[in-house]
Image (cartoon, grey):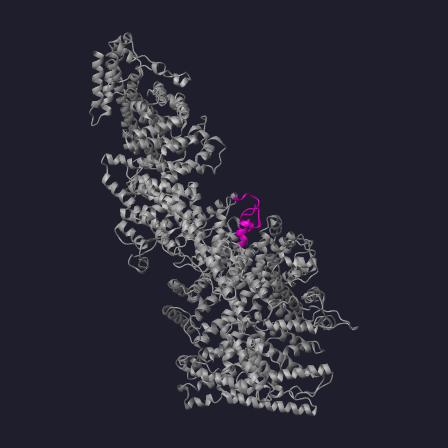
Amino acid sequence: MTSWTSFKDLLKLSESVILGRNHELFPDFESMLRKQQGNFYAILKNPEKDSKYRDLLKKAVKEPVQIPGWQTAQTLPASLVNEACILSDMYNLDELVALSLLVHGEEQAPIYPGLKRGLISVLLYYDAKYSQSTALKLIVQAERGVHWTYSLTDDVLNFLTQYTNQLFESGLFERLLDVHSEFTVTKEMELLSTNQALGPPRHRRQLMDYIKKTRMSIADIIFSRAAQRGLSLAQTLRLIDYLSEVEPDKEGQPSGEMSNVILLLALLYAFDLSVIHRHDEGEELAKDLPIVKDKSYVSEISKVLDRSGKTWKNPGYQGLAQLAWATTLAALRSIPEKAEDRFRQEFEQDEHFVDLALANKAFVAISELIKNNSLLILEEFYIKRLHYLLTDLIVLMPLKIKELRNKAEETARTLIVYEQEGLVPPAHLPQHFENLLEAIASVYNEDPLDLNLCLEFWYSSDYHGPQRNNARQMALNKFVRLAGDLLPPSLYIPYTRMLGSLANSPRAAHYVFNLLKQNGVGQASTVSWDHFFSTLARYLANLRQETFPVQDTVYRQRGTAIGGITAQEMVGFQEILRLTRIVASHDDVARVSLAENPVWTPLVTFLGLVTCSVPLLLKADLLKALSAFAKSRDIASTLWYYVEMAQVIPTAPSTSKFPQRGIHTDLEEVESRSEEYPVSRGFLELLNALVEVDVPLHLGAPNRTPGIDPYVKFVVESVLMKSHSRAYKKSSDKWQICELAVKFLHKLLMRYEPAVGDIQHRERDAPQQPGYSVLVAMLQDSPLLKMILYLIEESVRHFDEYVDFPERKACERTALSCLNIFNRCIQMQEIFLEMVRSEGSSLRVTSLGTLLLGVNQRTNRPDHMLKIAKFVSYGSEYMPDHAVEAASILAFVASIPSAQQQLLALFTEEPNDVIIRHGIVEILDDAFENEEQGRKVKLCLLKMLQQGVNLPHPSLVHFLLGFSIQKPLQKSQLQNPGVYGTPKNCLHSLLNILDENLKGLVDAAVVMEGYKLLHVILSHGTMSYPVLRFLKGNLRNFLVRHGEALPFSASPTMEQQNSTAHLLLCIAIDIRVSSLRGSTSQAQKLASVIFTSERTVDIADGEAGQRRDAGISNLLSRTFASITGMPFVSRPRVLALLDSVDVSQLAVPIPELELFDLGQLQSLLKECEMPSEDGGPSVVNVRHLQRRVERELSALEGTMALAQRQAIMQEFKIILKYSIEANGVKQQMWTRRCFIDSWRQLIETILLSTTNYSNDILVQIIQEVLRKCVQDSASQELNQPLCGLLVIAVTSLRVQAMKKQESELTDSLVAFLDERRTDLLSEIGMSPSALRVILKGIVEWILKTGPSAQRIRINLYTALIGCLRLSAVNPSRDSRGLGGGITAGLQAIGVETVLEYGDSFLSALFRDSASGHDVQRMLALSLLDTIISQAPIGPVASYAAKHGYIRHLLDILSGLDESLISLVCQELSVMAMKYLQLYSSIMSFFTRMAMTSRGSQLLLDCNLLGRLSEMNAFSHRPQAGTMDEYAFLSSPFHRFQEILFPAFSLCLAMLSGLGSEHRIIREQVLGFLLAHSETISSILRSGQTLNDLHHLEELSLLTNVISKATNIEVIHKGADGTNEIRDQIERLQTICLSLLPAYVPTDVAIDRVLRFSGVEDDPNSNIARHKATSMYLQVCLNLLNIVMNMTADGTRIYSRTVFTASFTMADFGAAFTGTRPQTTRSVALGVVVNIISAAAKRLKTTEVARDTLSRKLEVVESLPVDEINQFVSKMISEGSSISEKREAARQTLTKVVESQVVEITQCRFILEVSLVLLWKHMEAFVSTNDTMNASRLNISFDASFRFKEDITHYLDETFYKQVEEASKVSGTAGKPDDFNLLFIRRIRKIAQG
């Protein structure tokens, strides 16, 4: 015997290849079968004990021993060796195999909690036998044969056929029979009991099932071989010998072993030749069967089966074999090869064998087989063999059948004679025909497989099948008709019973109805509807007259009469009623025809008999027949009325002095005394049938309170509540009664919808819906609730024994109905309780969850939920329906937060923790025979786990998932089952389900909920980390494996799309968590899985061809080819996922209705909508809608309503269909939205968390998104998440390009809006054509979306801005000739592509900038800004001016004044910031326009600066304050700067755009400054006491504006030359001049500024220091330019002097110590000299520093770590690798070098301006030689003389040398700056005078 695992693997592989049609596994399957061939020869035979191995095991107890098959030598525990020896002795089993079973038992301990390894090993032993036999059964069933075939390839079929032939040729058949006789249940159970190897009840049941299933599999192997290939003569004889020894079942024991019945059927199939008439080539197929091929077969079998042969112990088996052989001999005549003279003698024995079969009661044996073996009708080919046996007998041997009928008539005449003489008829009279009819009735009585075999007995003229089948049906139909002609009394009951069985389908029932209807036309047939109902009517009349009528000859019998009829007549009545019930149940037309026939009136007759004193059994059948009629709505309504009028249950008060009698009396006085309850069961069946169809609310009016409450009261109080106190002859009766009663209550609840009217009616004592009282009782601690709980407890007590008992089926159905009631109450209780509270009713009801958690009075423990939860543990194997309902209840109670402690206490105590948790695990793991049941219960449990994940810890769900309930969730250690004693939990089962999905073995809906549960777990803040760690470590990187399996399908279903969506979100979570925790390898691995190629795609294949649509989609589908220069060679998985979803809009056309108003219909549908449980879209509750409309229709009265009822119902069906389709569309669109959103989130997470992606994949993603979304049929709802992804993708492209340019931009949004880096397109390798296509796609998408789709447009504008900035040009590069041609071409492509759409695009853009959402307006303005920056302003400016958009924006700007003032002066809210952002966007757009002369002129014409001058926001400058860098909102001072800075930038732009000679713009800028002079003066005054860089930046911008806007011409001519304006301008210049001493660019002064502004504390101090230094130098330069303008005279003949003729200067530190600044007259020329010296010094030192850093930048890879750390921030230096530090250092060095280049340029300009000022003043002061000049220059002659003397002292050679050296630095190509040298020479000349 091979190990257990090998047999399990064999079975699993066999199921995959044969049942799963997985032909890819066939090579492995073939190899395994060849290895197992020897084991199949000796199937179920154990390898015998070996003393050598036993000694080896005993030795292993003391020292390490190398055990065969084990890798290393080990010692073994003594207990393990002892158990192995015991197991070996039990089964005469090899010791090593026994040891292997025990080891596997130890491994499987988590799957079998509560069992020791010895008990588990016994289970595995029998499981191995079952797996081996089942695998062989599948193999034999899959071979080629004559009765069935599997959809396998020819290679597989040929191999399996050859393989099985070899096995059977080598004696497998004989071995199977030997095993079947030796391996019996009795022997094995005795062996187990003797060796104490039987565990708890469930363990015993499992062992019993394994043994029985193994025997069944052995028998099925023989059966399959016999049915498919036939049996050889030797095999047939061996099987006959075996069956002849099988003993009949003893009375009182279970009804036979099914395996023996299967072997009998195998023998019958060995004789079967029905293939001849079932196939067109039946004769050819039959030739290959041994019975035809072997010439000695017939004669040998005939000898064995003859009476002279051996007598069988079971005569019934022998009779069936003989009967089958007889039909075989008759069938052989149709084979020409057999119709020879030498075979004629054998063929003529067919009737002889029929006689032998009849003598052995073959027909009785058939009835007994069906009766005693319920599994027989559950297998198609079992029941078909009996069907063929009977039909072949009728068709092939009609004369013999006729002979049997004649003998039956003779027997009937004999019986009549004896009865007339008053004698007892002899017992030996033949009844073979009656038995034949009974056998036919037994075979076709039930049809659970819907085979409709009974239809072969009914011939239809419209049959178009094969001719042979046509003749066969005619023969069978003829038999049915002739059997009923002139029917003698003795055949009446069996014939009627046969008709009832042959009516067991809708079509067959209609045939029977027509047959009985025709029999009553023109003939006095006793088998007709006329005869049936007339007889019953006469019987009713006789009972009412209390006289005995002349009896019909059919029922006329001697003997004791029961109520006027004999016992046989009563049986006849029962069969008539049974036939009527069957026909009425199956055929709607027959039901209506029977009920509405005015002659027959069955309803009246049946109810009349029910009210009479008739036998209880007959009354019960009458009630059951009425229940069949109740299936039609119209009949049910009438029947309710008849039942009420007949007072079957006394419901109305009576004036009679006698007590009212009815079924209640029968129950209390008759049935209870006899301990049998047929009438009660019948009446309950009738009530169930009636409430299934209709519940009349006004029944009984006006005689009593309307409704069916009396019937409900009878069922509850008289039947259900007293059921456990009554005596029963059969224990099954109790459960049948309870089943029907509970089912009745459940149906009432199913029909009930809570309504406020019911509660109001209660207050007024008015009638309510019948389900109301039941619901109220279930929501109270009522006797009904206690009874339901009692029934559940009793059923659990029976089921816990794991043994079969007679009433098991009824008990199961009762428990299921009880669970159904609980679930229905749970569904309604929330609405009902809310209604009770809202109405203020006095009704006291409680939540069912609270009641279920109450104390059980029988156990004094709150264990109701434990009883209910146990049904879950029964489910996978025995009661799957119960598991579904119990799981729903458990899910409801487990979702109650307050119930967690109680549930944990109940479910975690031993042994409940094992039973419940393992029961749920088994449900999730096991494969159900009924896939639908398995799907339902698994879905319910998975949803329960989803709901409980987010409950406070600890909770029941946390316990079920394997988390610790004592420790915090994040500290839980998840392990595989068995590791450190870890039991298997629901998390393990979940992961197993998802792994099985990769093989396609799990239902799609279950997989969807499984992935959703995993997503919910990973989304949990504290559960995610231990689960992710478990997934990566213990499950071979679970998410990577599942990501590689994507997409699950090219055309996924909704379930698959949802599954994929949740899986993508799980991967996104893992990527994000891994990146945050530093596990970059895991994040990169998952990202590479998503972005790697999934499949090969050729651009010319069909898929690509489908994309070649007209328009942008065609261009997008081919753009990647233009990028790479080659067609598609691969399809990344991320794009394959996007391919699998359709973004088209789905809609259901509104139906055209004539009778229903569409407006009211839509309102009704809206009212019937209900929110989805899983957070999906609201859908119409079709059931609620149906009931609403039905109630409305029932309220209609009048002739018109009745006449139109049919049309109304037809349109109502259309409405229901429309509702269902609309729900489906909503669900589908929601699923697509979730899928796309998950896809988007995953990509965004990858882009934001990893760097493991190429730019090509981003380009492809953008193109695919655009291709899908620009289609005309694209849904706006689905486009919304995709447009968001577009922004992130474009941003990522920009970030990647910037990284390649060695930029330091850490925030992607900052990177997106940053304009410092341009010409990025070439950095990412994107071709201009690709960019052009992307731009066209975005613009078309913008134009396609309406103004209402603001969110989509916001994202599209953002993406378009990013794409345009990818192609922008850096002006500095162009001016130097660095790639200017390429970048200019790219810029032209980008802007020209956008502007190709002309006014339509500009109209949409300007309209969105002027109205709509604030964010949309800002982005539209930003997009206009970007377009203007890259294109000629002409088209945009012209359109804006022509349509008045500029003036409209100015109006908006003016309207923002008050809001901006409130931002500065009041408390700020987050929402108020939108005004500041909108202001900034408008100002940015105007600034961009002002950069060109035309734009500036347009703005000037629109009086932009005048509007700004009128705004008061600029005059509300607050006091400077400090700002917390971690504060979300900035301080008022910084907000004011955000208002002021754009205005300064705009002024500078307009001054630059119109040129320095434009007087009007200078005047308007000065007008703006003077309009807010207080603010300007405040800024200038604060320049002496700088606090931070923001003040410095403020001063830099203001001085820049003043320097460009003020000159002597403006002073003299501006503002009409008024003195007031001139004085204000001079005052500004004076203040600026006074600031100049404070901004001498010495190292001391700059360091002091840096120290006061806090730059030294900045983490990025290297960059921040240079930024502050640059602003300081810029202020100095601006002040010098202002002073330069002051020196110019209006006449342009003379220059003014603004400095005093002195080289001495005041303390420059006064500006930073709080002293008052010097006045203009006190500023000495020495300030300029010091500026020159400081600028020259800084110019030289900066140049040296730049050269040093440039060299370090070139060799940054080889710099030591200490030097690297100097250029990185502390945050990076602490937790980063050396490579990351070097990269950060490279970026910092690049930035610093660029800043130093700027500083050098600024120092050069400072030096130039200062030299000019020095020269001008020196020339003026030295040339002062008269009083007039001295007065004009504000200098005395003496001062001029002293100045001349001081020149040589202060301007020495050191000064000149310093300036000359600085001039060399500021020059180009190593040459000095000629401009500086020129003025040095002039200054030297003046000094040397």
From the top left corner, tell me how far across and down residue 1255 is, in percent: 32, 46
Question: Seen from this angle, which residue lies furthest right?
Answer: 657
Question: Seen from this angle, which residue lies furthest top?
Answer: 1838
From the top left corner, tell me how far across and down residue 1037 is, in percent: 42, 49
Horizontal side, residue 548 vs residue 1161: left or right: right
Decide: is 1762 above or below 359: above
From the top left corner, tell me how far across and down residue 808 is, in percent: 62, 67
Horizontal side, residue 432 vs residue 52: left or right: right
Horizontal side, residue 1181 vs residue 554: left or right: left
Quadrant in the rendering for residue 1077 = top left
Query: How many numbered callouts?
Result: 0
Residue 1152 in view of the camera: yes
Nearest the eye: 229 or 395: 395
Decide: is 855 above or below 1447: below
Residue 1080 in view of the camera: no
Residue located 68% across and 63% down the image: 767
Quadrant in the rendering for residue 573 = bottom right
Nearest the eye: 245 or 1576: 1576
Range drawn in magenta? 943-969
